[in-house]
Amino acid sequence: MKNKEDDNNMKPLQYSQNHFKKYGNIMKWKYVTTDQLEKIIKSLNLKNSHGYDGISNKLIKASLPFIISPLTYICNEILKIGIFPDRL
């Protein structure tokens, strides 16, 4: 049995590796549903201002019926693959 003194004398990286091994892969993603995504988009403020992509919240809300399925697919693929874009 290890004591606390052994843990305190370890290097931080070694400490992390030793302790995270016992937990394994416990993080599990739940896929987003169209209803959840629709609720999020509808909660956005109605503004004409936009980000680097030139798409305003007002335009996103107006096009919601047409983009909800592809957007849900994209979000779920991001979660499945585990690669998150810098910008979306």
Image (cartoon, rainbow, N blue to C red):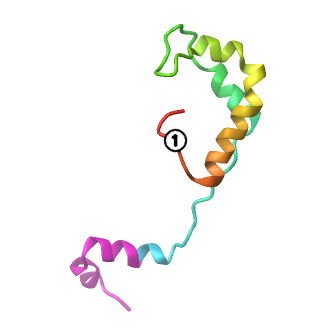
Q: Is residue 3 visible?
A: yes
Q: Is residue 29 visible?
A: no
What percent of the width, then of the height, locates residue 45? 56, 14
Task: Decide if residue 14 is on the left or right side of residue 38.
Answer: left
Establish if 5 lies above or below 54.
Answer: below
Q: Residue at x 36, y 71 (%)?
A: 16
11 within the magenta span: yes
| Amino acid type, mark 1 | Pro
Residue ranking furthest to the top: 48
What percent of the width, then of the height, locates residue 42? 66, 20
Q: Residue at x 38, y 92 (%)?
A: 1
For the residue pair 15 and 50, the one nearer the viewer reads as: 50
Residues packed near mark 1 inside 10 Å, few (<14), some (14 to 19) or many (20 plus): few
What percent of the width, then of the height, locates residue 82? 57, 53
Residue ranking furthest to the front: 53
Query: Secondary structure of the magenta portion, mostly?
Result: helix
> Which portion, as a residue range, is magenta?
1-18
Q: In the rendered image, which quarter contains the C terminus?
A: top right
Q: Quadrant of residue 58?
A: top right
Residue indicated by mark 1? 85
For the residue pair 3 and 46, the one nearer the viewer reads as: 46
Name the secondary structure under disc 1. Answer: loop
Establish if 85 lies above or below 24.
Answer: above
For the residue pair 31 and 2, the one nearer the viewer reads as: 31
Residue ranking furthest to the bottom: 1
Q: How many marks?
A: 1
What percent of the width, then of the height, locates residue 13? 31, 72
Q: Residue at x 52, y 73 (%)?
A: 23
Establish if 54 lies above or below 37.
Answer: above
Task: Decide if residue 52 is on the left or right side of residue 66.
Answer: left
Q: Residue at x 29, y 79 (%)?
A: 7
